[in-house]
Amino acid sequence: MTQKEMIDLKEYLKLHYKDYDDGVFLSGKTGYWSNLSEKKNKEFYKILEKNDCKTAVKSFMPQFEEMIFSSKREAALELLDHSKQGICIDYGSMWGVLSVGMAKRGHHIIAVDQTYDSLKFLKLRATEESLENIHLVNDDIRDVNFKNIADYALVNGVLEWIPETSEVVVDDYFKKSSSLKKEKKSNQILKKPREMQISFLKKVYESLKKEGQLLLAIENKLHYGYLLGQPDPHVNLKFTTFLPRNLSNIISRVFRKKDYRTHIYSFSELKALLREAGFSKIDDFCCFPMYHFPSLIVPNSKEGIRQYETYENKDIITWKQKLVFRYFEIFLMKYLKARNFCPSIIIVATK
Amino acid sequence: MKYIKGVHRHGSETFLIISKDQESLKTKSIIKSATTQKGINSITSEHKGINWYNSQTSKKINAILEKQTKTYIKIRININEDFFNINTNVPYLKLKKYLDLTVKHYIEIWHNYKNQKFAPFHGDLSLVGNVMFNNKDEVLFVDWEQFENNLIMPTGLDPIMTIIENVWYESLRSKKIDKNVFKHVKKLFINLNEAGLLSSFLEKTPAQTALDFIKSNLKIWNGQSFKLPALKIPNEYIKEIDNTIAN
């Protein structure tokens, strides 16, 4: 991409967003989805004023250091073609680990997130790392209207949250109903989760140029761990990922006093969703141990699962974890080739 | 078919992507990429190592640096089709032929460093994956991530590490190592010495001195030295190797 095209991209964003403040294009909409509460974020920014990003994260929230900075999280980006520079929209960029990954690969990034604080952090990080090719947009990703502009779109751990319109502080969200303070709209008048997700994916599709690629990562609802009783990572309830949605709804209403809306899918369901959104060429991959920190990503095919092999996983410490997440997985994947029960799904869909 | 086989394996901060033929499932190429400084350094070393190796041999590694910027590097290494890795999970004496071929190839490639104290250094000349063979008994040294060309490591250290590694594997297989293993080890050292490719540093107690050099240059392995088998071998075997060579 030439300097002129880069300026054009900024001009394009100016056309969509009249307000621009401190390096961030503003839609005027407010929203919140973060691992930190607003109060904690304010405290964090005080530390950031006196330190570089890495030092600030290390001292204030060391538990997120890897999540924010580890390039391990970028692995799936290697499934995309980086031979030419392009424009990439990172939908729900959060602190921007994948935006940074794509920027380092030479692309121009539009990082869109509803949480202004996360974008402010990403701006500081991009400045520190001399990455001038990241443009920040504070908007609700459900409402953005980019047309035929992107060569790449990233939807990483985001699709499942599309139907959830409450403000989310992840840790609090796990603690059931008491934390759900600000509900934007009543769930009764919201569209069904699947409809909202398709509508979002249609917008993503429209934002891509012809031959543009979407990289999507999400948990597999049939992950063997969930079948064995591991809680749904979005609502902290057992079995809700794969039970019939009506039943999951009842469980969620009983335990969380709200509907079950963070829908995740199996391979075939997810591909159907993408086809409905307009994508025709869809390549799907099994990701181990989870898409957040992948170690092995193989095609979801007979030949693909034959490439399964054991991998490093420093999170496996206890004998119970070894039994379930190492030996059982090896048995399931290496011997039974039960790829539909892999932990998470990565999709590369082309327009 | 393309898949991601390794992400930051052994702390390398690189991505390892495998491209296979859709029909035969034969590996066509290995792609390595990185965005961190550590990973970029590692792949840069590999590229330099391959270029140096290719300048010394007729059987060349086909490597293409597909992209290199300050923040991203990607190298594609096309597989030399007729070469294969051997199964090393067999007793040492069954590997004799391959160890002989490895030392012979080292002597051919490093011949310009005859009677030199220091030489370029591969850093991980392990039969487990990094030394390949074909049916004509030709040899290919691959995986040059640890390549060190500043002449700080003694000539002959690479094959000594290979030998120590295989003695260690043998020690894991059986409590008492067969005398013939040490006899063969001695023969390999003699071959290196006769070729003038055993640094004067390594003439006395070569195994112990090799380990000392490795320990004082761990930075070469870029945080991956913990995986070196040579550092895991019990001291008694190091002494036994040195005693065998001395007598």
Image (spheres, coloured by chain):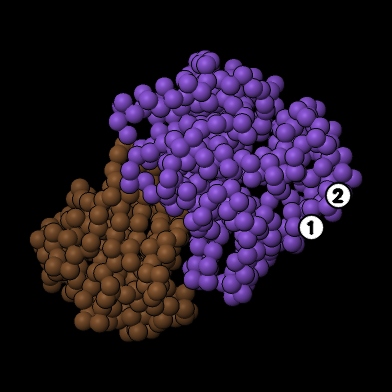
Q: Residues within 10 Å of mark 2 (few under 14, many from 20)?
A: some
Q: Residue furthest right?
A: A254
x 58%, y 35%: residue: A92
Residue at the disc numbered 2 = A251
x 64%, y 45%: residue: A198
Chain B palette colour: brown
x 40%, y 82%: residue: B91
- Mark 2 and mark 1: span between their CA atoms? 10 Å
Residue at the disc numbered 1 = A243
x 21%, y 81%: residue: B136
Q: Answer whether labels 2 and 1 touch (C-beta < 8 Å).
A: yes
**Where is residue B118 shown, x and y percent of the image?**
17, 54
Which quadrant holds the N terminus of chain A? top left
Q: Earlier in the sequence, mark 2 or mark 1?
A: 1
> Label 1's element?
loop
- Residue B58, above or below A90: below
> How many numbered callouts?
2
- Residue A9, above or below A350: above
The residue nearer to you, when weighing B65 against A183, is A183
**Type of amino acid under label 1:** Leu
For mark 2, name the chain: A
**Where is residue A131 shown, x and y percent of the image?**
39, 29
Chain A palette colour: purple
**Type of amino acid under label 2:** Ile
> Label 2's element?
helix
**Where is residue B203 shown, x and y percent of the image?**
20, 64
Relative side of B212 to A282, left or right: left
Residue A170 visible at all = yes
